[in-house]
Image (cartoon, rainbow, N blue to C red):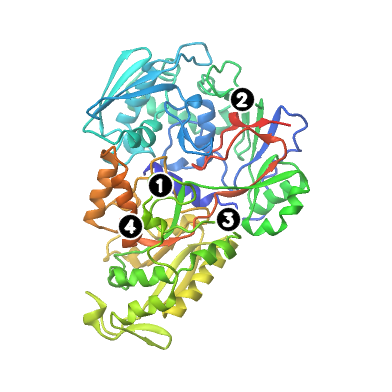
Amino acid sequence: MSPARTRLVAGAVVSASTLLLAGCSGSSDSSSASRDSINYALPANFTPNWILPIGTAAHLNTNNRSIADSLWERLVAYDGSTGKIAWNKKASIATDADFAADGKSVTMTLGDRHWSDGQPITSRDVQFWFDLIKANKTEWAGYTPGQAPDIWTSFKTVDDRHFTITFDKAYNSEWMLANQLSEITPLPQHVWDKGGDAKQVWKNLNDAAKNISGYASDPLWKTISGPYSVKSFSTSGKVVLTENKKYDGGEKPGISTVNLLPFTTADAEKNAVRSGSVDYGYIEATDLDQEESFTAQGYEVKPWSGWAITYMPYNFNNPAMGAVFNQLYARQAVQHSIDQASLAKVVFNGTAVAGYGPIPQGQTSDFISSEQKTNPYPFSTDTARTLLTDHGWTEQDSVMTCTEPAKCGEGIAEGTKFEMQVLSQSGSTVTDNMMSAIQSSLAKTGIKFSIKTAPVNSVLSQTPQCTSDQPICDWQLSFFGTAGSWYFSAFPTGDSLFQSKGGSNFGNYSNPEVDKLISASTTSNSNQPIQDYSAALAQDLPVIWLPEPVYQVSVIRNGLGGFSQDSLANFHPAQWKWTS
């Protein structure tokens, strides 16, 4: 499972507008009595359950990674904490990356850093991670075949603070740094390597990490490099972090104690905000009409924009509608029927931005093409109807029906009705409202759009990659993006999403020309290939492009500042400060 798929799952589940089981976890504390602590509300029903800074498929939780990064800093930390996604050297163990002129290797320099027990952090600690991942890659959630560690052919220690990683060929250095090397976390080899081969060490670490109640007491987790240590970690999800007094990095904590509070519903969390018992929480987009009631309680209301895209995948292998989906004109008719401007304004209360392609549009970047920016398929049900009638479809009983198969396209039989069903994430009023609005506008085109809902985990399990002869391939459209369908790493490559047979290419989209553009974007040091990829998929419509909602609408107590909300959807406690 790819790193980006991790983001997908987290992004889908973590929505502030997802209403789940009633009731609070019961762990909400009173408001911070001093400026030495902070109460942070975790997303509803998304409790931390893993401490090891190496994710596995069973522990795909964005919060896990944010906590781990506070304990063990990454080799190369990327975040959007300054308002722009970039390498944050203050929060990184490495200080420099020197790529060879031929693009086939990189020599990294480590800072003069120490573990909390006083031992220096060295190249051996990085190689320890490297060896563990090489030997256990299929169990690592960050693994995508054909990417790291497959593309790393050797690790050579130069000295304690310098090492060289060699690649199997030349790569785009920005992609390599932002999406591959950023996955590395130096680990305390002198403490964690208890003997045995890499597979045995992996098993030992994972077995220890399963004991959540032991996180605060197990000596294994005491040797850290980050700004915080674990004071307590409950199985219900409440986590208390305390300042690491031995930290010698660049992000010294501004607040000594961080209380991470779990909630089982967004309503329970909102009640905690109203009572003033959290310093950093969230509300739903639909609550913005009541913004003054929150600002009157001493909060700033601030949408948290994500580096993400939102979409509905088509199932191109669906036996009933796959032939229709495979016709570009049909996809164009659907896209012309989506009124993104109205959805963003009305359904999302102005907190979403329209998205017309595979590159996030919530922030400016050098990756997006002019074609994607300008929307190749503006809303027009008249244009959509004309596309269908010009291709052999006639409206019958309010539904477009193929009456001239020769014009309709290969595999579309006479009498085929343009009827499609989506399996959509349940529990979100915002999502329900968006689906209803889409249903209404598609009906004006003559396309019948049926909506079925299920919990997000069920949506993901019931809409997998498939072949037309498999019973599970009866799904037609899928939606799991209440808080964004896909959160990218810093470099928004499409290899998992839209490359043929990509690990998270759910609808089995395949276009050889797009495959070439995706491959070129990861190997060329020019941004032209990724801009060409942006233009190609804005035109070719592998999915239904939809507005990108904010990650959440944050409510932040007045006086808490010194940071920007990270558009990669991570939180960084060391950056929080009481400024007044």
**Earlier sequence position, callout 3 versus callout 1:** 1
Question: Quick one: which residue is furthest to the bottom in this view?
Answer: 397
- Figure quadrant of the C terminus: top right
Mark 2 nearby-residue class (10 Å; few <14, some 14–19, many ≥20): many
Query: At label 2, which amino acid type do we have?
Result: Pro
Q: Quadrant of residue 383?
A: bottom left
Residue 510 appears in view: yes
Looking at this view, is 283 or 333 the one in front?
Answer: 333
Looking at this view, is 112 or 67 the one in front?
Answer: 112
Mark 1 nearby-residue class (10 Å; few <14, some 14–19, many ≥20): many
Q: Gap in Å between the C-alphas at discs 3 and 1?
A: 24 Å
Which residue is at 72% across, 44% downward? 299
When the figure is inspected, residue 35 is found, relative to residue 394, above or below; the finding is above
Secondary element at tag 1:
helix
Q: Which mark is residue 537?
A: 4
Query: Percent from the top left, x then y, of residue 30?
Result: 76, 38
Query: At label 1, which amino acid type do we have?
Result: Arg
Q: Which residue is mark 1?
A: 5
Q: Gap in Å between the C-alphas at discs 1 and 4?
A: 19 Å
Q: Quadrant of residue 173?
A: top left
Secondary element at tag 4:
helix
1 vs 4, front mark: 4
Query: Percent from the top left, x then y, of residue 204?
Result: 42, 26
Q: Which mark is residue 351?
A: 3
Q: Gap in Å between the C-alphas at discs 3 and 2?
A: 31 Å
